[in-house]
Amino acid sequence: MTRVGLDWALNGVDDAECVVVVDVLSFTTTLSVAIDRGAQVLPLPRQHESAAEFAREHRATLAVGRREAVSAGGVSLSPASIREAPSLDRLVLPSPNGSAISHRLATTGCTVLAACLRNAGEVARWITENRPATVSVIAAGERWPDGSLRPALEDLIGSGAVLDGLPADVELTPDAQAARAVFRDARSDLLERLLGCPSGTELVAAGFRKDVEIAGELDTSTLIPVLVEGVFRAS
């Protein structure tokens, strides 16, 4: 029987055969949009010292800060910027949470999938069809100024969306059951929940409401980003 648990950041992934990274605002949403456009995505921690050199070595476009991208016409962690870009082939997408987690998971040997609300149903279908023995759904969360974990409602909802698509014969841990219940409660007014959570209000205040709207596009993508040799590619 497949057993699926919910964990935060990198907790609980040591024994998992499959790890599903969820960072709704915004890494995995942006990744999903990029994969839909046919791009390959290389995850990287935001503070990586040689990100520009890393991108050059891999012949990839480096995503920059949201404000910098607006002024320079580039791409960033904003899914809207990826959707509006004229063309994309390979993209280095740094972020402090989902991307950093994915970068660290690349060497563990487990299967790593990226989920968001846009592809939650497809990720659930993949788990159902492939039946890994143990799955850890990782809600990436945010960070407080001191670097400690700030649990994020949007990632709990996104994780719950994946869990809600699993069949009854999949064993869910109590935490996973709770996340599923949170999604079911939020589904009827999903966008309002995203706009009202701290991460959503921060993005709206900064002028990036469109990013939140894209994050709320439930089950609009049929592609799953899978991490293979450090690169996310469409399944």
Image (cartoon, helix red, strand yellow):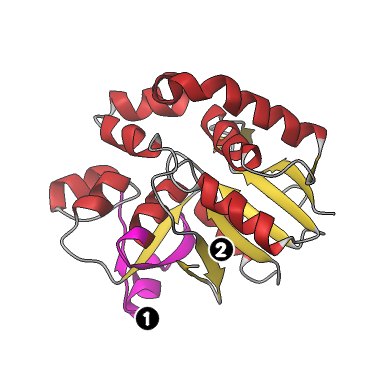
Q: Position of residue 32 (x, y in %)?
A: 41, 54
Q: How many other residues sit within 10 Å of disc 1, few (<14), some (14-19) or many (≥20)?
A: few
- Name the side, left or right, on which 217 lies relative to 128: left
The reply to whether residue 137 is visible in this rendering is yes
The reply to whether residue 49 is visible in this rendering is no
The image quarter in which residue 56 lies? bottom left
Q: Residue at x 59, y 25 (%)?
A: 184
Relative to 150, does residue 39 appear above or below in the rendering? Answer: below
Q: Position of residue 173 (x, y in %)?
A: 81, 38
The image quarter in which residue 148 lies? top right
Q: Amino acid at mark 1?
A: Glu
* Residue found farthest to the right: 1
Relative to 15, does residue 144 appear above or below in the rendering? Answer: above
**Relative depth, front residue between 147 and 1:** 1
Q: CA distance from mark 2 to mark 1?
A: 17 Å
Q: Amino acid at mark 2?
A: His
Q: Is residue 42 magenta?
A: yes
Q: How many other residues sit within 10 Å of disc 2, few (<14), some (14-19) or many (≥20)?
A: some
**SS type, badge 2:** helix
**Residue at mark 2:** 103
Q: Position of residue 81 (x, y in %)?
A: 24, 49
Q: Position of residue 36 (x, y in %)?
A: 34, 59
Q: Is residue 216 magenta?
A: no
**Residue at mark 1:** 57
The mark nearer the N terminus, 2 or 1, is 1
- Name the side, left or right, on which 88 lies relative to 174: left
Magenta stretch: give its range.
36-65
**SS type, badge 1:** helix
Relative to 141, does residue 12 appear above or below in the rendering? Answer: below
Relative to 51, does residue 128 appear above or below in the rendering? Answer: above
Which disc number belongs to residue 109? none
